[in-house]
Image: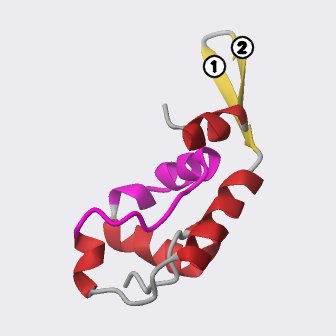
């Protein structure tokens, strides 16, 4: 596990409550370390890029787990175009200032 993912894991809390035949999960997360890392990545990025960068395994976003679970429940993570549109509307989750769509 990388140093960054260990830091992120410490910020993620899950609480499970069991009632009769169902379980209710409540998630909470401090997004501050992730948002700070995203901001720093945007500030440090190389402004001279090629269009192919996005196709070559370029890391373009870091979304907190709680937010990702919410997007997954809405079906956004299953649609690449919807996810890119979401990131353009929520640039705090992007690790680049490059336009993704």
- Residue 19: which numbered mark, if any? 2
> In the shown orientation, is residue 77 left or right of residue 8?
left
Quarter in which the C terminus is drawn: bottom left
Query: What is the x, y in percent for residue 26?
Result: 72, 33
**Pointer 1 with pointer 2, Cβ within 8 A:** yes
Q: Quadrant of residue 63?
A: bottom right
Q: Is residue 20 above or below residue 94?
A: above
Query: What is the x, y in percent for residue 2?
Result: 50, 37
In three-dimensional space, the C-alpha distance between marks 1 and 2, rounded to whole angstroms, equals 6 Å
Query: What is the x, y in percent for residue 33?
Result: 72, 52
Q: Residues within 10 Å of mark 2 (few under 14, many from 20)?
A: few
For disc 1, the marked residue is 23
Q: Residues within 10 Å of mark 1 (few under 14, many from 20)?
A: few
Residue at the limit of the structure toward the bottom, as seen here = 48
Q: Which residues are magenta?
A: 56-78
Is residue 62 in the magenta section?
yes
Q: Quadrant of residue 77?
A: bottom left
The answer to whether residue 32 is visible is yes
Residue at 63% from the left image edge and 19% from the top image edge: 23
Q: Secondary structure at mark 2?
A: strand
Is residue 7 in the magenta section?
no
Depth check: 39 or 11 in front? Answer: 39
Query: What is the x, y in percent for residue 53?
Result: 28, 76
Q: Is residue 24 above or below residue 42?
A: above
> In the shown orientation, is residue 71 left or right of residue 84?
right
Residue at 76% from the left image edge and 55% from the top image edge: 32
Q: Secondary structure at mark 1?
A: strand
Q: Quadrant of residue 38?
A: bottom right
Residue at 40% from the left image edge and 63% from the top image edge: 59
């Amino acid at each position: 596990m990388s140093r960054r993912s260990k830091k992120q894991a410490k910020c993620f809390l899950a609480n499970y409550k069991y009632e009769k035949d169902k379980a209710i999960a409540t998630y909470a997360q401090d997004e501050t370390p992730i948002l700070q890392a995203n901001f720093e990545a945007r500030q440090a990025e190389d402004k001279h890029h090629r269009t192919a960068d996005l196709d070559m395994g370029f890391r373009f976003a870091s979304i907190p787990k709680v937010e990702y679970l919410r997007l997954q429940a809405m079906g956004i993570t299953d649609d690449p175009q919807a996810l890119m549109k979401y990131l353009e509307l929520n640039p705090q989750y992007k690790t680049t200032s490059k336009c993704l769509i």
